[in-house]
Image (spheres, helix red, strand yellow):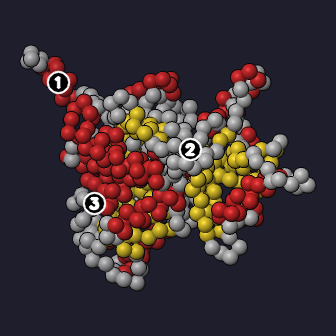
Amino acid sequence: MAEKTPTQQLAEKLLYKPAYVADKDADVKQKAHAFAEGYKKFLDNGKTEREVAAESEQMLKDAGYVEFDPKKTYQPGDKVYFVQFKKAVVASTIGTRSFEDGFRLVIAHTDSPRLDLRPTPLYESDHLSYFKTHYYGGIRKYQWGTMPLSIHGVFTRDDGTTVTVRVGEDEGDPVFCITDLLPHLSAEQNTRTLKDGIKAEELNILIGSDAVEDEDVKEAVKLNTMILLHEKYGITEKEFMRAEIEITPAYKCRDVGFDRSMVGGYGHDDRVDAYPALMAEIETKAPAYTTVCVLTDKEEIGSDGVTGMQSMYAFHFMQELCRTAGQDDILAFRNSVCLSADVTAAYDPSWASAFEPMNGTYAGRGVAIFKYTGGGSKGSASDACAELVSDVTRMLDKGNVAWQIGELGRLDLGGGGTIAKYVANRGIPVLDIGVPVLSMHSPFEVIHKSDLYMAYRAFSLFNNAQ
């Protein structure tokens, strides 16, 4: 190999040249593929925030975590958790330093764009029975037609008991679907904008066609559907009014590509960050700073409600820890640092005009950092200070974690946000970091295994920083 010229050496020293993780390190590639196997099981087992919370709680119990008791005092190395209304999870490992020295938070969300059933969803039309839906989060409605769908959630009965529903995931289960027009009759539909290719009121789920054998019964197909539901779950139509039923794609996640370098599936946003955050928390043993892993809910609709990050549940947990030790929670918040673990858009060559290549983030180049989110004006963003960006990126460099930094896409095309600003509102410095995603918010998103693994490495480094 020819010796580099002084100019080439100078360029190497002064200019930034991004690289793809798998191209540099075959060992990391193998570890990334192995780590992704656990993630795929997690993704398949948790199609909704309730299912993710239940799966996460079991993982925490298996790892020796005990339910948090605010009346007890805790020692370094103790591991505690609690579940907020069966939808959000907080897990913590007590550190050797004082709570007043600050907490180290990693916060991801576990809700994903989906369809929910309306309070009165069941109806019959022309000898077919349907559920009416209300879309949740930023879906592109046209993407949800003509695909197998599954039903998840809970009914609460008249006697106060709860029954869990999960249909369409197991081999042999029936599935459900939203129908669409055939191209032979779609001339009028074809004049619609893409946004309204399928309208919200057309997102009706086909669930049956058999009728009860009684000519005098009106809505005989609807009644037959309700009879089947009553036999299996012990419910009447009234129970839909106090149920939480969610509709998701029915398929399992799969490796993508001849090289199996990627994972495709539903719910990467944001379970692709929730899983490595949870695994990093579980594997943290003796941290200096007390770690707090939050798997929160409702991010896709603004983080409102008692399980979203605009609620106080995670912050109350930290305050209660401080109180058990007789320490100042305001000082603890001031000295804390948070990683907002959320996905971003991966640069997509097929849709290159939506991105700004110099400031895009790319699948396979490592975990992505965002100093700010928001739209073209940075509106509603938590803009991390340069010192925090420096602290985190230097930590990643020392730990040999591949990272990249960028923005969501080309300016003035839209924008996005995370939970970062709600943490910053409590006086806690926060930086967005997560895995780039192709086809984000679609029923089949794609991520790179190397980026998933680098997110896990990043969160582990953060938890164990001295």
Q: Give above or below for 118 relative to 179.
A: below
Residue that mark 1 sits on: 10
Q: Residue at x 61, y 47 (%)?
A: 174
Residue 428 coordinates in the image, percent (x, y): 40, 60
For the residues labelled 2 and 1, the Cα–Cα distance comes to 52 Å
Please report the residue visible at 54 percent of the width from the left and 68 percent of the height from the top: 85
Query: Farthest residue in the top direction?
Result: 2
Please name the amino acid that badge 1 sits on. Answer: Leu
Image quadrant where residue 89 sits: bottom left
Q: Residue at x 44, y 49 (%)?
A: 43
Disc 1 element: helix
Q: Residues within 10 Å of mark 3 (few under 14, many from 20)?
A: few
- Mark 3: secondary structure: loop
Residue type, label 3: Glu
Label 2 or label 1, whichever comes before in sequence order? 1
Q: Tell me whether circle 3 and circle 2 mark residues in contact (CB < 8 Å).
A: no
Q: Residue 355 placed where, x, y %?
A: 47, 28
Q: Is residue 42 above or below residue 195?
A: below
The residue nearer to you, when weighing 174 against 271, is 174
Q: Secondary structure at mark 2?
A: strand
Q: Which residue is mark 3?
A: 283
Residue at image mark 2: 249
Q: Amino acid at mark 2?
A: Pro
Residue 432 visible in the current orientation = no
- Is residue 115 found left or right of 335 in the rendered image? right
- Spatial CA distance of label 3 from label 2 is 31 Å
Distance between the alpha carbons at the discs numbered 3 and 1: 41 Å
Q: What quarter of the picture does the C terminus occupy?
A: bottom left
The residue nearer to you, when weighing 221 against 101, is: 221
Quarter holding the N terminus is top left
